[in-house]
Image (cartoon, rainbow, N blue to C red):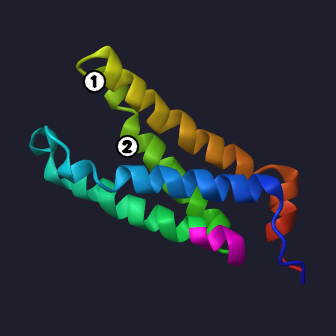
């Protein structure tokens, strides 16, 4: 069995890990009390699951689907912010919260990435 992962998978794992780590301290930021608790702590749980998926991308075949699910949930949770963000800086952060997970999905569904997760 080939244990090497292609560059797109490694890139997706690193990006997902960094994105998840950056999202973890959000409940501690100023103004977090204005965000609904379910959204705030749901995002924290999603970040922890994202870290699990990122680690899994290097070793486990099931992590491909977990990565896709986590990325789709990140996109869906960020999407309302496009309309509801109060200022341009907040909207820019929301756009990053949509583009980065979309990039992760794109990287893991490339043909070279899919071959790495194919059942032998």
Q: Looking at this view, name the residue that lies furthest to the left.
A: 33
Find residue 85 and name its label. Answer: 1
Residue 7 figure quarter: bottom right
Find residue 39 and name its label. Answer: none
Q: Residue at x 74, y 58 (%)?
A: 9
Q: In this rendering, would 30 be left or right of 11?
A: left
Q: Position of residue 57 (x, y in %)?
A: 66, 68
Above or below for 47 versus 95: below
Q: Are marks 1 and 2 in contact (CB under 8 Å)?
A: no
Could you tell me which quadrant the N terminus lies in? bottom right
Q: Residues within 10 Å of mark 2 (few under 14, many from 20)?
A: some
| Mark 1 → mark 2, Cα distance in angstroms | 13 Å
Q: Which residue is mark 2?
A: 77
The answer, for residue 55, to whether it is visible in the render is: yes
Residue 88 figure quarter: top left
Q: Looking at this view, name the residue that lies furthest to the top.
A: 88
Q: In this rendering, would 114 be left or right of 21?
A: right
Above or below for 21 versus 105: below
Above or below for 60 versus 32: below
Q: Residue at x 27, y 16 (%)?
A: 87
């Amino acid at each position: 069995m080939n244990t090497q992962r292609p560059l797109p998978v490694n890139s997706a794992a690193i990006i997902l890990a960094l994105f998840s780590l950056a999202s973890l301290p959000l409940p501690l930021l100023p103004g977090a009390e204005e965000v609904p608790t379910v959204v705030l702590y749901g995002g924290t749980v999603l970040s922890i699951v994202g870290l699990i998926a990122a680690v899994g991308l290097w070793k486990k075949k099931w992590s491909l689907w977990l990565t896709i699910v986590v990325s789709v949930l990140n996109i869906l949770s960020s999407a309302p912010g496009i309309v509801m963000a109060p200022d341009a800086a907040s909207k820019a952060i929301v756009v990053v919260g949509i583009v980065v997970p979309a990039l992760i999905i794109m990287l893991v569904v490339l043909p070279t990435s899919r071959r790495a997760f194919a059942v032998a």
